């Protein structure tokens, strides 16, 4: 669960601190007020790429910090991240004006990839336009595999697919001219040697960037810490000796007058604290690296990493991946003389294994598609698709949803032999067609919500974020969506941005977001609405008026009361 969010100098947010509870957290406000920026900040913290333009104008860096509760995370993930059951943990990420980012987990530097993995375990985002991604067959395939828990089978297939690719590369390498083969070997050896000589390590760059300010300002830090140490323990009017003399006087005073004992105890505790500070300052100044060689080494290392990133990958992980690719390519080129018949035999065996793995994966996907289709249909039935048609045909209008899984022998894709297509029809008498060809914006939003609801019931991700899930729907459907979100919030923590009062009425906690201008500079303000304030906001959403009439307020109260009845 996300317990606390702190945002500093991110986009137009100067400083924002929000605390959250379980259940359905709703954000409302005028269009353009900055609601989506809050979601964007959470996404940035959890590893998403960010531009330096997100640093607030005039600020040196942006920073987002989240405090999470580990209560609902599986034991495997708790062990992976070194977090105790039921404990809290903190993640933080910074972005400077030059576009560089630094991540921290429980105070220690971590990579963007680490934060991204943490985000995958904690939060499922549904952005404003994410329902458009549902039209992509690759996204549909990923959702199906996630529902069927087929990730391990996909991973095994991908491993064999990669092995076959390497065999094909070696086969192709045999076809190269000897001159071209030698040229590529020399090039790849040079590149691999350059990367390996650097001895890069994951997280090293972040650690260097964290220690660089201390090395850069070492002399100044040493002088300031020494000055503070002197003021406490020596020099003019030292604090500790003076406090010790005062304590002796108070001890004598307390023997004569017991009412002064509290002052004596307070000074005694303060003196212990001062001595702790003195010792820590001594250790701090002693451990400072004031040798210019340390700064030069740090700068040199950062420069080396920067050069390698420009050549071979955007991140250190990309450079290391490039090294692995070079090793494989070299292996293929250097062993290009392998007997053709032996290579063909290896390739045939690999394709046989791939066919078997792909066939097994297809069977799992077909079974999962059948179950997921039924589960999504059950969710969609409560999202406004069911309605009676005209009396003369006596038929019931109902939505249809199915997942087509087709395979082709000998077709080896990166994630299997299958093509997946979500099929949909919202109208009787019309055949099922690909979702991307038939669903309107409002229908697509509801299909996505139905999918998210089904998938959320089968995984351990504790937090769901919906940025305007109400796209393209009317008030009646919005109320059904609100009811669905409220039911989902019983087992998950939900954050939802909405413009629909029918959804806002279901809020467990309601936050109003507005853009304010201070000294000519825009910023974002967020207020949690309680009681009458929540009624006023829902009335404003209903009528679009700054000041609502009594009729509007009554309508808002009715919406809230109805939502409470639906929750029960």
Image: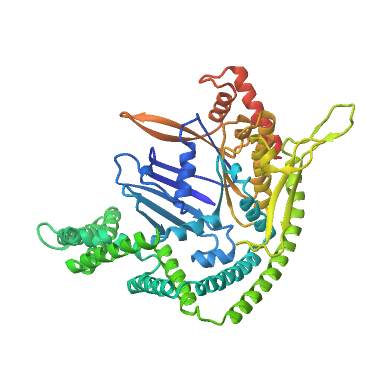
Which residue is at the far left?
236
Quadrant location of the C terminus?
top right
Q: Position of residue 276 (x, y in %)?
A: 27, 64
Q: Give the quadrant of residue 369.
A: bottom right
Nearest the viewer among 340 and 323 is 340
Nearest the viewer among 133 and 480 is 133
Q: Position of residue 229 (x, y in %)?
A: 18, 61
Decide: is 471 above or below 203: above
Q: Give me the residue at 61% from left, 81% from top.
A: 341
Which scheme is used to colour this image of the protein? Answer: rainbow
Q: Give me the residue at 39% from left, 65% from top.
A: 203
Q: Position of residue 442 (x, y in %)?
A: 65, 35
- Answer left or right for 428 relative to 78: right
Decide: is 548 above or below 197: above
Q: Give the quadrant of residue 347.
A: bottom right
Work out whether residue 243 can be spotted.
no
């Amino acid at each position: 669960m996300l317990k606390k969010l702190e945002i500093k100098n991110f986009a137009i947010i100067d400083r924002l601190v929000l605390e959250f509870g379980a259940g359905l957290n709703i954000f409302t406000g005028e269009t353009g007020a900055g609601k989506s920026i809050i979601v964007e900040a959470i996404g940035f913290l959890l590893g998403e790429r960010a531009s330096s333009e997100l640093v607030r104008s005039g600020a040196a860096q942006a920073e987002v910090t989240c405090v999470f509760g580990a209560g609902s995370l599986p034991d495997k993930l708790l062990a992976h991240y070194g977090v105790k059951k039921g404990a809290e943990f903190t993640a933080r990420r910074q972005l400077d004006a030059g576009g560089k980012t630094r991540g921290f987990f429980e105070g220690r530097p971590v990579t963007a990839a680490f934060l991204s993995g943490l985000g995958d375990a904690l939060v499922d985002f549904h952005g404003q336009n994410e329902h458009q991604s549902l039209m992509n067959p690759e996204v549909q395939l990923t959702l199906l595999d996630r529902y069927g828990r087929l990730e391990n089978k996909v991973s095994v297939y991908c491993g064999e697919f990669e092995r076959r690719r390497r065999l094909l590369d070696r086969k192709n390498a045999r076809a190269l001219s000897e001159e071209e083969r030698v040229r590529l070997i020399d090039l790849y050896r040079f590149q691999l040697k350059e990367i390996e000589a650097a001895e890069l390590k994951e997280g090293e760059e972040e650690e260097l960037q964290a220690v660089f300010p201390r090395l850069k300002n070492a002399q100044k830090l040493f002088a300031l810490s020494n000055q503070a140490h002197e003021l406490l323990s020596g020099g003019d009017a030292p604090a500790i000796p003076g406090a010790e003399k005062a304590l002796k006087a108070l001890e004598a005073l307390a023997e004569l007058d017991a009412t002064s004992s509290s002052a004596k105890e307070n000074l005694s505790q303060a003196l212990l604290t001062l001595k702790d500070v003195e010792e820590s300052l001594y250790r701090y100044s002693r451990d400072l690296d004031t040798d210019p060689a340390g700064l030069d080494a740090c700068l040199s290392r950062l420069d080396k990493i920067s050069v390698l990133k420009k050549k071979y990958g955007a991140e250190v992980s990309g450079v290391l991946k490039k090294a692995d690719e070079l090793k494989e390519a070299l292996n293929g080129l250097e062993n290009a003389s392998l007997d053709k018949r032996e290579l063909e035999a290896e390739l045939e065996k690999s394709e046989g294994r791939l066919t078997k793995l792909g066939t097994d994966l297809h069977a799992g996907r077909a079974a999962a598609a059948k179950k997921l289709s039924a589960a999504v249909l059950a969710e969609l039935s409560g999202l406004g698709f069911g309605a009676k048609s005209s009396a003369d045909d006596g038929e019931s209008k109902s939505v249809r949803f199915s997942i087509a899984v087709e395979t082709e022998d000998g077709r080896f894709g990166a994630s299997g032999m299958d093509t997946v297509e979500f099929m949909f029809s919202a109208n009787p008498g019309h055949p099922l067609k690909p979702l991307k060809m038939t669903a309107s914006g409002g229908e697509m939003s509801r299909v996505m919500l139905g999918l998210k609801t089904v998938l959320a019931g089968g995984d351990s991700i504790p937090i769901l974020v919906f940025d305007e899930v109400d796209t393209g729907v009317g008030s009646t459907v919005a109320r059904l969506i609100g009811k669905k979100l409220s039911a989902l919030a019983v087992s998950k923590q939900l954050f939802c941005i909405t413009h629909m009062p029918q959804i806002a009425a279901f809020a467990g906690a309601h936050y109003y977001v507005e853009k304010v201008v201070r000294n000519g500079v825009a910023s974002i303000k967020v207020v949690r609405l309680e009681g009458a304030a929540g009624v006023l906001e829902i009335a404003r959403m209903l009528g679009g008026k700054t000041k609502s009439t009594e009729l509007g307020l009554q309508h808002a109260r009715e919406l809230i009361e109805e939502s409470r009845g639906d929750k029960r």
